[in-house]
């Protein structure tokens, strides 16, 4: 084996997804993933902490992109407008490969441990959004509410995007869900 395998991380991701779909997450080993990718198990562990991480790699990149979007939103923008801008960035980040994302979500849905990990990831995204809003001067309670509402919008839009036959662009769905949220909350007045 060569010391440096170009494209190893992507080959490992692809091999893992194929095996998880074919055999199931729990029945797939790191050794099998590495073998299918044409690398060693040691190379696998250079790229991923464990086989779960293959499904969650990129979470920090997404969180960072959302935080940057919050920081770069126009001064004086309302908290939900800032969250909407962050969701738009998130939609670009999450939306390029719907079929791969669908497979990922099916794998997660079949495993309670992975479902828990996904919920933790979403909670951390909400915390990062709230942190960014507070840094903009939004009061803690309002920052938490706007951030959590944003995560709900993300979850509802993401589910719709994955399950509809021809859903279109994830970002457009997020905007529709944000509008629906506005209508629902306006009914409370």
Image: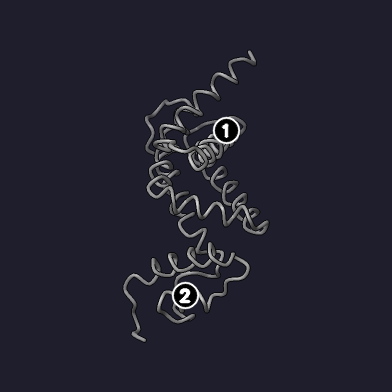
State left or right for residue 170 relative to residue 30: left
Q: Say which residue appears at 63% left-offset and 53% top-offset.
A: 115
- Earlier sequence position, callout 2 versus callout 1: 2
User: In percent of the image, x 52 and y 45: which residue is there?
Assistant: 128
Do the numbered discs 2 and 1 sit on residues whose CB atoms are within 8 Å? no
Q: Position of residue 111 (x, y in %)?
A: 65, 58
Percent coordinates x, y for residue 157 in the rendering:
51, 36
- Residue at the location (59% across, 55% down)? 108
Residue 149, numbered circle? 1
Residue denoted by label 2: 44
**Seen from this angle, which residue lies furthest bottom?**
1
Query: In x, y percent, where is residue 66?
Result: 44, 43
Asked whether 130 or 33 is in front, the reply is: 33
Of marks 2 and 1, the one in the foreground: 2
Quadrant hosting residue 26: bottom right
Circle count: 2
| 42 relative position to 108: left or right | left
Q: Nearer the viewer, residue 42 or 169?
A: 169
In the picture, the disc for residue 158 is none
Q: Quadrant of the C terminus?
A: top right
Whether residue 2 sits left or right of residue 50 in the image: it is left
Q: Is residue 179 positioned above or below 100 on the image?
A: above
> For the residues marked 2 and 1, what is the alpha-carbon distance in whole angstroms?
37 Å
Q: Residue at x 65, y 54 (%)?
A: 116
């Amino acid at each position: 084996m060569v010391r440096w395998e170009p494209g190893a991380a992507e080959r490992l991701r692809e091999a893992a997804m194929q095996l998880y779909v074919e055999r199931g997450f729990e029945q797939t080993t790191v050794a099998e993933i590495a073998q299918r990718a044409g690398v060693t198990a040691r190379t696998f562990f250079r790229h991923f902490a464990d086989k779960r991480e293959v499904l969650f790699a990129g979470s920090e990149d997404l969180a960072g992109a959302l935080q940057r979007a919050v920081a770069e939103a126009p001064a004086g923008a309302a908290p939900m407008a800032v969250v909407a801008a962050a969701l738009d960035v998130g939609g670009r980040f999450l939306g390029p490969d719907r079929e791969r994302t669908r497979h990922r979500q099916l794998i997660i849905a079949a495993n309670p441990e992975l479902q828990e990990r996904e919920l933790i990831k979403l909670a951390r995204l909400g915390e990062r959004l709230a942190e960014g809003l507070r840094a903009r001067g939004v009061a803690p309670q309002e920052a938490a509410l706007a951030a959590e509402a944003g995560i709900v919008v993300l979850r509802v839009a993401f589910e719709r995007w994955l399950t509809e036959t021809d859903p279109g662009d994830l970002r457009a769905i997020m905007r529709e869900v944000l509008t629906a949220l506005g209508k629902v909350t306006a009914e409370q007045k």
